[in-house]
Image (spheres, helix red, strand yellow):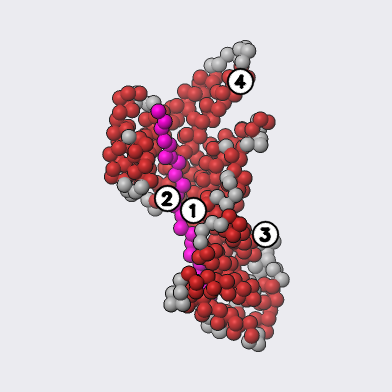
Amino acid sequence: LHNIGIVQVRSGRYDEALDAIEEAVRIRRGALGPNHPKVADSLVELGIALLSMEEYEDSLDIFHEALEMRETEAEIVAEESDSDSEDEEDSQTRRKRRAEEEEKAQLAVSKVLNNIGCVHFEAGDPEEALSTYEEALEIQREIVEERSADEYDVMSMTRHPAALNLASTLCNIGYVRMELGQWSEAIQVFKEAAGIQEEGLEPGNKLCVNTFDNLAYSKLLYKNYIGSIKTYKKILNIQDSCGQGDELEGAETRWKMVHAHLNLCEYTKALDHLTVIEDIQERELGKDSSEYRATKELIGWLRYETLKYPSPIEVLSRMLTSRKMSNPCTERLCCACSSRNINEVDLASLCEVRMPENSCKMSGHKVSYA
């Protein structure tokens, strides 16, 4: 029933999932005891199902119940570890095993905290979400730092569940920062998350691409156009080398790069990307599509802009931006290109870049084996 509930949650059949998981919780409580870890496993899945149904209060109640059980389990494991005899011949092996058990128990606590943060975020309370995410992050950092200090685990640390869970929590914090318009803070957490995912996951993993996309967008909104272009180039290289997605996804990445190039007054580079985008859209969408017409309109404006005689203000603006003059502390340009306003061209409407579609990264879907 537990596994059936997981499948139904993944399939979007939430009412059926709710029935199956509630029954799994009832059976497990009766057979294993009310505080057994497997009961907490099912409670976590029940909380996820309720969150998916936007039953936020009920979801929080269930997650807090699961959290209390996870914390109790972690305390018991820690007490057992402290009571171990130090004079046993296999004490080193035993301590290692106990340390792993403690780590696993603490990681389980952090996962539930992460999920509670997700509920707060989806319920429209970003500040409470941020506080809970950071509580989970503190536990995960402690696990990662302790494991990194062990010589036998240095090489495999980035593939350890704690590191990848830490990256997921960082991404969730990044989503909150984006929601609050805190672009500098968002850049910091997405950069750290991307580094962990890039080391710990296979090349071209979709989680990595998504994190890079959020990182690039945050740089774009922070007006670090040069940095955003570098990150979008990385995404484009991944899409090309790994064959990820269709041509339209590559065109969308190029479109975002066009936005950054326009803000740098790099019209020729923007035109190069737009020419590729135009070919893809004509082939995939047709000339009657709104996307194709928008690209044609922008190409027409840019061709005019590159051929017309510039004013002194435009010359100065282009000189500063072309030389990449920026504030060394913020990496933001000292002077943004203002020539688009001279001709009453609305850059935002011609080359709009939408915020990436994100959903909170939940910790759950733990299938039980017989």
Q: Do labels 1 and 2 touch, CB within 8 Å? A: yes
Left or right: 315 with respect to 217?
right
Q: Residue at x 52, y 41 (%)?
A: 165
- Tell me the SS state at disc 1: helix
Q: Amino acid at mark 1?
A: Tyr
Q: CA distance from mark 3 to mark 2?
A: 31 Å
**The label number, if any, that marks residue 93 in the structure image:** 4
Quadrant, the N terminus? top left
Tell me where residue 338 appears, x and y as whole percent. 60, 77
Quadrant, the C terminus? top left
Dominant secondary structure, magenta: loop
Is 199 located above or below residue 320 in the figure? above
**Which residue position is annotated with label 1?**
175
Disc 2 crowd rating (10 Å Cα; few below 14, some 14-19, many 20+) is: many
Q: CA distance from mark 2 to mark 4?
A: 42 Å
**2 or 4: mark nearer the eye:** 4
Q: Amino acid at mark 4?
A: Thr
Which residue range is magenta in the image? 347-370
Reply yes or no: does residue 369 show up in magenta.
yes
Tell me which numbered mark, 3 or 2, is placed earlier along the sequence.
Answer: 2
Q: Amino acid at mark 2?
A: Phe
**Which residue position is annotated with label 2?**
121
Q: Do labels 3 and 4 touch, CB within 8 Å? A: no
**Which residue position is annotated with label 3?**
329
Total residue callouts: 4
Q: CA distance from mark 1 to mark 2?
A: 9 Å
The front one of 287 and 342 is: 287
Tell me which numbered mark, 1 or 3, is placed earlier along the sequence.
Answer: 1
**3 or 4: mark nearer the eye:** 4
Is residue 147 visible in this depiction of the protein?
yes
Q: Residue at x 56, y 79 (%)?
A: 299
Tell me which numbered mark, 1 or 2, is placed earlier along the sequence.
Answer: 2
